[in-house]
Amino acid sequence: MADEPLVLGIETSCDETGVGIVRGTTLLADAVASSVDEHARFGGVVPEVASRAHLEAMVPTIDRALKEAGVSARDLDGIAVTAGPGLAGALLVGVSAAKAYAYALGKPLYGVNHLASHICVDQLEHGALPEPTMALLVSGGHSSLLLSSDITSDVRPMGATIDDAAGEAFDKIARVLNLGFPGGPVIDRYAKEGDPTAIAFPRGLTGPRDPAYDFSFSGLKTAVARWIEAKRAAGEEVPVRDVAASFQEAVVDVLTRKAVRACKDEGVDHLMIGGGVAANSRLRVLAQERCEAAGIRLRVPRPKLCTDNGAMVAALGAEMVARGRASSSWDLSADSSLPVTEPHVPGDHDHVHEVSKENLYS
Amino acid sequence: MLLLALDTATPAVTVALHDGRDVIASSSQVDARRHGELLLPAIDRVFAEAGLRLDAVTGIVAGIGPGPYTGLRVGLMTADTFGLALGVPVHGVCTLDGLAYAADLQGPFVVATDARRKEVYWARYTDSRTRVTDPAVDRPADIAEQVAGLPAVGAGALLYPETFPKAHEPEHVSAAALARLAAEKLAAGEELPAPRPLYLRRPDAQVPKNYKVVTPK
Ligand SMILES: [Zn+2]
């Protein structure tokens, strides 16, 4: 529909330079330039390498998105950008571009929350988000359970990881197994040929007195590493496929169990899963099984929309426009620790998170 | 002609408008940690002061550093994006050259800015328009011989009087100087560098240490 808001979204919170264009809940373009190859040899994302890559990739990626969408910049109704959370220096490149673009085109600017964007992107796949929606966000940077009754104004944290993010655990185990970086896709691939019940790795924070919705993957990571070392020390071959499958099973078992429990406890009949780890094939299968058994409708966007991208930012921006939320001001800052409870940063924002900028220019 | 000049490669967030004859509006604020917040409001203010709008510009001039990266990128990303949105050329000018131009000295001298980590970004000039060395980043003590006896300008020179005993103002670059220098060079038909950052250092890449054994020995 032509009267739905046409919004361009910019995402630079980590190593992907994403520019997406949506009209309402319709995806028109999703252009991504990734610097992942430049980080691979370091075994993790190097912030300065990411920031440098964002600066070089931004203009060509905006250009590509506009061509892909077949729209003119003049017709945009707003520019949305990830204001946080994320890598401070990387976020600042995207925020600088978005501000300049919005200012030059005379369009309103919407600084939005990266986590809320991960949830809102599902609108591009499955239509308007049910209200409320339970969301499980799992990636290399986050592992959280969030409950939202209105994605533009109300996102409530139910639980989060108390140590490593789920994706981080995948990266680390892949490194122990010498499988390279990033770990998620390669573990998934090996796990397909392994036995998920071969080794009983621990399920973190699942005891009766543990917090019901929080996650912990650090103990699991250590247990897996210790198991592998014991094999190596004994001169035995490490059964990489079984280790991958058993490790992966431990992660997705806890994730899905807690997500379904949160839905039941809160009486929510929809679960959405987003973030890079949502691309994991076993997570998708197990979540589907458990949601079906519990009478919960599962919504998982296609993998390309689960990883960091500009379309998710545009999707949330379009929702901000549609619901008449206040736009951001020209002094919008990148906030590396923007709380998930703030889906966007309206112009009268009181800068309570000043402290988080301490590390910005370090 | 209407040039918008900006520089975020030093602690100054500085913006100026040049109409082909001279600077018609400018703004400079010193706050090393808030380039991202201050730049666009400053641009907005400068246009309001001149009674003009951004879409009237015929070119953008951006300081390409060298300078601390996080701040430097704010200006360059802004300039790049303006260029895209407005379809006007974006020119780069070495930030040290802007400082040299503002110093307005006749004989040989040095420009040095603060590169943090006890280093300076620096270059040597024979006069305010002529740089004779490539911009470099060094510890002041390591370049003492190369700059001995020369007057010096910039915060990096003021910060290390043992190496730069004849240091004086200006401390930071001003976009007004950058605009005047660029306008002069463009009028003379000179080609300005592309608006790409002069980092001079490789990114700090903490290569994760080899996999750490967790089993106690
Ligand atoms: Zn993410």
Image: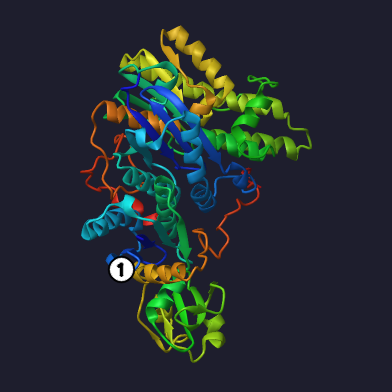
Q: Position of residue A58 (x, y in %)?
A: 48, 45
For the point 48% across and 24% down, which residue is it? Answer: A255
Identify whether A321 is placed above or below A357: above
Please indicate whether residue A236 sits to the left or right of residue A88 in the image.
right
| Residue B176, quarter of the rendered image | bottom left
Q: Is mark 1 within 8 Å of ligand 1?
A: no
The C terminus of chain A lies in quadrant: bottom left
Mark 1 residue type: Val
Q: Secondary structure at mark 1?
A: strand
Counting the numbered discs, the total is: 1
The residue identified by callout 1 is B23
Taking the image as drawn, is residue A204 in sight? no
Q: Quadrant of residue A221?
A: top right
Color scheme of the displayed model: rainbow
* Up/down of A307 relative to A287, above or below: below
Q: Position of residue A97 (x, y in %)?
A: 40, 47
Q: Residues within 10 Å of mark 1 (few under 14, many from 20)?
A: many
For image coordinates 36% across by 27% down, the residue present is A146
Asked if one can make out residue A53 in the rendered structure from this viewpoint, the answer is: yes
Which chain does the numbered disc 1 sit on? B
x and y, in percent, of residue A306 in the image: 49, 28
- The quarter of the rendered structure image containing the N terminus of chain A is top left
Residue A81 x, y percent position in the rendering: 38, 39
The foreground one among B42 and A319 is B42
Residue drawn at x 35%, y 58% is B35
- Would residue B4 appear left or right of B73 to someone viewing this image? left
- Compared to B70, does B213 lie above or below? above
Between A335 and A233, the one lying in front of the other is: A335
